[in-house]
Image (tube, rainbow, N blue to C red):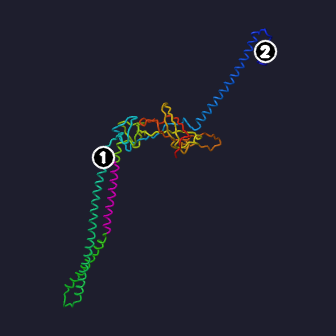
Amino acid sequence: MNDHTTTTELPPGSTVHPLVRGEQLSSRQRSRRASYAKWVLLLIVLVAAAGAATYWYLTRDLATTDDAYTDGRAIALAPQVAGTVVALHVADNQRVKAGDLLFEIDPRAYVAARDQAQGSLQVAEAQLANARINLEWAKQEYPAKLAAAQAALAGARAVHLKADADARRQRGLPKQATTQQEIDTATAALSSAVAQVDQAQAALRQAELVPQYIGQAEAQVRQLEAQVALARAQLDQATLNLSWTRVTAPQDGWITKRNIEQGNYLQAGQSVLSIVTPEIWITANFKESQLDRMRPGQKVDIGIDAFPGLKLTGHVDSIQLGSGSRFTAFPPENATGNYVKIVQRIPVKILIDAGMDPDVPLPLGLSAVPTVHFAGAVSR
């Protein structure tokens, strides 16, 4: 059924019923409204298309993610010796500088150990000095004894030669020219000379061990030198242990996670506090599909959820060579028949260049929204 009402022309002077005229006006209004709606719809479509094109044009060289957070270095401190905390010099969130004293451990036991090690070193050094004197004495004494033994043997041989000649002479004389007593005396003198030669040879063999005697003295010196080195090392270790009773800050930063109080007994290696260093950066986990054009050196705009008014700028420093899931304790295994592809995320390190107060760094772990400009300068 046609919605439009067909009107017929009336002769001049005739009148139209009001109902017929109303129907004619309503039809024209509907027509105009339909035409207006079409134009409005077309305008909306054009505006949406223009907005989408503008958004694509403005963001085609950008990559952003809300899977990002502030990151930095948190140095965990632990004492290297055990003991009771006798002094605590820091409070929560306090700013410290490298070398500042943080806390002290009772040093009395370590002072005693150092003094004992120092006494042992002095004893070892005295023994070494005595052994060196003995070595010098041996180098002079034993060669002299060897020379004396050689001279004694030469003298004994000379006496033996004379006694042998006297005995031969007495035995060769006629009985009228000598007596039995003189023969016995000459024979006894010869026997005594032989004994003296044997004794001198034995003394010479003993004196000829000069290298062994000197080597023994040298070995004693080397042994005591090793003992001195050991005692010195023990003293160094005791001194080092004593120095470790005073714990100082290794770097500038802020005290965090302090779980130590004066009077606590600490074990060596027990974590007692952390120091957050001033160097802060952004770790952003971008999708793997966003890395095609991302390069180190590109400019980055950074927003921090906790501080909406803070506008930071930085640059891409590096891209981790591995996804986050690859370095988990239990990497996913996809060697099954039911495989679902999941877009991986790759950590990207972003350094902050401007906008942050160096004296008031951002806390670690704050949510951030970095936006990387692909058209930025790239430095390799």
Q: Residues within 10 Å of mark 2 (few under 14, many from 20)?
A: few
Location of mark 1 (residue): 112
Across and down, in percent, residue 313 comes to 49, 37
Q: CA distance from mark 1 to mark 2?
A: 123 Å
Across and down, in percent, residue 15 comes to 77, 9
In the rendered structure, the answer to whether residue 88 lies left or right of residue 130 reads right
Q: Which residues are magenta?
A: 211-239
Question: Is residue 223 magenta-colored?
Answer: yes
Q: Is residue 142 above or below residue 188?
A: above
Please give the name of the residue rendered at 23% of the width and 89% of the height, measured from the top-left corner.
172
Residue in the foreground of this view, choosing between 188 and 355: 355
- Are discs 1 and 2 less than 8 Å apart at CB? no
**Which image quarter: residue 52?**
top right
SS of the residue at dot 1?
helix
User: Is residue 319 shown to the viewer in this render?
Assistant: no
Residue sticking out furthest to the front:
12
Across and down, in percent, residue 328 comes to 54, 42
Image depth: mark 1 or mark 2 in front: 2
Q: Residues within 10 Å of mark 1 (few under 14, many from 20)?
A: few
